[in-house]
Amino acid sequence: MALPTVAIVGRPNVGKSTIFNRIVGERVSIVEDEPGVTRDRIYGTGEWLTNEFHLIDTGGIDIGDAPFLEEIRQQAEIAIEEADVIIFIVNGREGVTTADEEVGKILFRSKKPVVLAVNKVDNPEMRADIYEFYSLGFGEPFPISGSHGLGLGDMLDEVVNKFPEKKSEPYEEDVVKFCLIGRPNVGKSSLVNALLGEERVIVSPVAGTTRDAIDSVYRYDGQDYVIIDTAGMRKKGKVYEKTEKYSVLRALKAIERSDVVLVVLDGEEGIREQDKRIAGYAHDAGRAIIIVVNKWDAVEKDEKTMRKFEQEIRDQFQFLDYAPIVFLSAKTRQRLGTLLPAIQMVSENHSMRVQSSVLNEVILDAVSMNPAPSDKGRKLKVYYATQVAVKPPTFVVFVNDPELMHFSYERFLQNTIRQAFTFEGTPLKIIARKRK
């Protein structure tokens, strides 16, 4: 189920990024536990009253040398395209400006729900000065202070109230849903067309819960599949060419509705930092993953080329060491037949369950052979393990003290489970819990 999207819009220096950081809190982290994962601070995940949502900070958009008002207009247009609800930030100390009115006109024409927040209202005496902002036409302005965290609760109450109604997924449980993500021009659309053209068994186009997305439903080898399209990717124009970071947000929406994610790389261009950013979100979401190297027909190669490229992928995507790699060409359909069997395989692994008795035999044998190191005189003791969920496979390990479960030992347990069972293509989640 795709989360609602909230965009923070406003002219420069009204405090958009401060409010963004307040809402996402510790969810946006500069230091990552796993190697090879990088993050943009332009978007994050917020939560209010048990409602999770994507949050966009348009202040993080780099539009180069665009004129001042043109930059504001482009930021607002992107927010309009992507968001379900818009937070319009203005500066309470400066009053209504021409730039505020310009942004307000664009947002008003969008007909999207808008919550007007007057920032930098740091004390009660300043509240009397916010009423001029009624002139922008968005109803009651909410006085807030990003720097002190004042008034954000009332503002977020209103934001959550404007969320669209949740829609149920229109597919049966046994349908395998997958999406293709990656940088622009890596050949995602060509690969979708090649898959559909190869099979020619499209059952029906179904409108997805992601705005303007069309899901392609078809059957192959007795299994029903859905290719989830990504809203907005078809729209061309200077705004999207200059704001490539927004492709990640559209990818997130598709990832949330998918069982399997194909991370598409350009075999000609090689690996880019953006590839790792996008792949990192599929990993964080717990989806089954296949790395697809497209345009393999255009690569000059010998008998060692594929092995070298695969090694480079393993070096650059260390956090995806479980993901199989498929080399193909959407243009020539070279090796295209290897893709759907790989999708079926990782989908089955993503939803596989392991018997508790067999799991414990494997875990306890491994722990006895390789016990956890001592930490300040204390030692982790593993008593019992059980699988509690699928998609991704999730295991609870009962221990004497969860604080003693170091990240490296958690990785050891994950690798132990992988070696004993077939979990290729899916991340594993381990939760340490104190035995009662």
Image: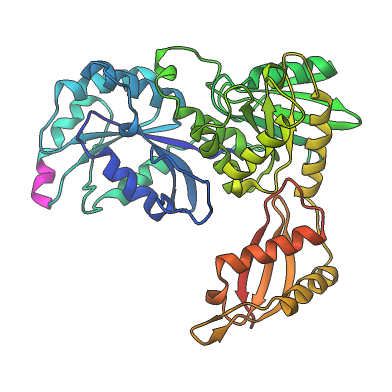
Front in this rendered view, residue 165 or 246: 246
Q: Residue at x 60, y 41 (%)?
A: 282
| Residue found farthest to the right | 222
Q: Residue at x 66, y 44 (%)?
A: 287
Q: Position of residue 148 (x, y in %)?
A: 21, 54
Image vertical order of residue 407 relative to residue 276, above or below: below
Q: Position of residue 39 (x, y in %)?
A: 45, 43
Along the horizontal axis of the image, is 360 left or right of 44?
right
Q: Residue at x 84, y 65 (%)?
A: 355
Q: How is the image coloured?
A: rainbow
Q: Residue at x 77, y 52 (%)?
A: 423
Front in this rendered view, residue 125 or 327: 327
Magenta segment includes 126: yes
Q: Main secondary structure of the magenta part?
A: helix
Along the horizontal axis of the image, is 213 left or right of 123?
right
Along the horizontal axis of the image, is 278 left or right of 118?
right
| Residue found farthest to the top | 237
Along the horizontal axis of the image, is 7 left or right of 341?
left
Q: Which residues are magenta?
A: 124-128
In this orientation, does residue 190 appear?
Answer: yes
In this orientation, does residue 161 appear?
Answer: no
Q: Position of residue 71 (x, y in %)?
A: 28, 20
Magenta segment includes 30: no
